[in-house]
Image (cartoon, rainbow, N blue to C red):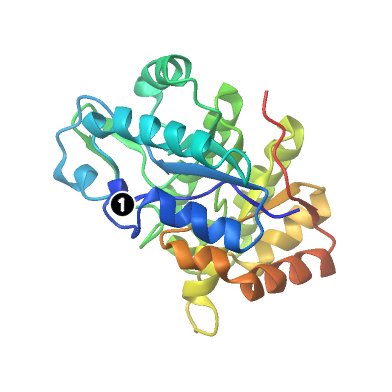
Amino acid sequence: MKTNYHTHTPRCKHAYGCEEDYIKSAIKAGFKTLGFSDHSPWPEVKDSMVSSIRMDVEELDDYVETLRALRDKYKDEIEILIGLECEYFPERMNWLREIIKTKSLDYIVLGVHFAEEGKDGFSKYLGRNCNEEDVHLYLKNCIEAMETGIFTYLAHPDLFVRGYGRWDEKAEAVSRAICQKALELNMPLGYNLNGYAVFKGTDVIGYPYEGFWRIAAEIGCQVLIEYDAHDPEFLEDEEIFNEAETFLKSIGCKVIDELILS
């Protein structure tokens, strides 16, 4: 069964194609379910960085309404789910809980890229040039976020390896802690095809990182292959999905293709 729960829209300012383009590509590729989880906006944020990587608060209503209309239009061809990809910003979790309720969102993807430092700004990007303190901050955010019960699954959990730039005892310990918590909470981990496409065949230590997924397999975590689509045609790349699935199963990962949504 083909599914994808990690799909973006141009509102995040770094994706291409309208929502209907993604849906048409998913139908063409034989998907049963397509979940949209564009980068969540946040209220009362003035930092200029934020506006360049996620939708604005004022766009949220149109995002939900557009997808609801398309869900109805294509209901006989594909299941459309509406969610968000969100950071873990502790001071904004109450706002997120309210949005989930008032907008009747289907699910929330945890994507840790930054850490909250104050009302008007966030930390540096944790997927680049991370020191040991940054890596511990990444781990702290992942663990605390998973424990909130808000998030359905953790996207690209090995993003920090790209930022840290090496695989050593520290990286292994952090990976093991993330995987142990995911197992404890029965939370799937997302094997990211967008990262796979970017770093495949390069000498860069990127993500997905093999060492992380061998730990996930050893511990027994559920693994969900996610396209993290920023371009509709990427959903039609079946070869990249098959490569990922073959690798994950070869190392003993428990690959799932469907999220259980309450």
Left or right of 106 on screen, residue 179: right
State which quadrant residue 152 falls in: top right
Residue 242, position in %: x, y?
71, 71
Instruction: Choose between 93 and 235: the one closer to the eye.
Output: 235
Residue drawn at the location 67% of the way across and 29% of the way down: 261
State which quadrant residue 98 falls in: top left
Left or right of 102 on screen, residue 171: right
Left or right of 149 on screen, residue 49: left
Instruction: Choose between 132 and 1: the one closer to the eye.
Output: 1
Residue 35, placed above or below residue 202: above
Residue 141, position in %: x, y?
48, 36
Residue 198, position in %: x, y?
47, 73
Screen quadrant of the C terminus: top right
Left or right of 128 on screen, residue 75: right
Q: In this orientation, does residue 215 appear?
A: yes
Residue 146, placed above or below residue 127: above
Q: Which residue is mark 1?
A: 10
Residue drawn at the location 31% of the way across and 27% of the way down: 61
Kind of residue sitting beneath label 1? Pro
Residue 253, position in %: x, y?
80, 57
Q: In this orientation, does residue 82 appear?
A: no
Within 10 Å of disc 1 (Cα), the crowding (few <14, some 14-19, many 20+) is some
Residue 25, placed above or below residue 66: below
What number of labels is visible? Answer: 1
Residue drawn at the location 20% of the way across and 31% of the way down: 45
Question: Under tag 1, what secondary structure?
Answer: helix
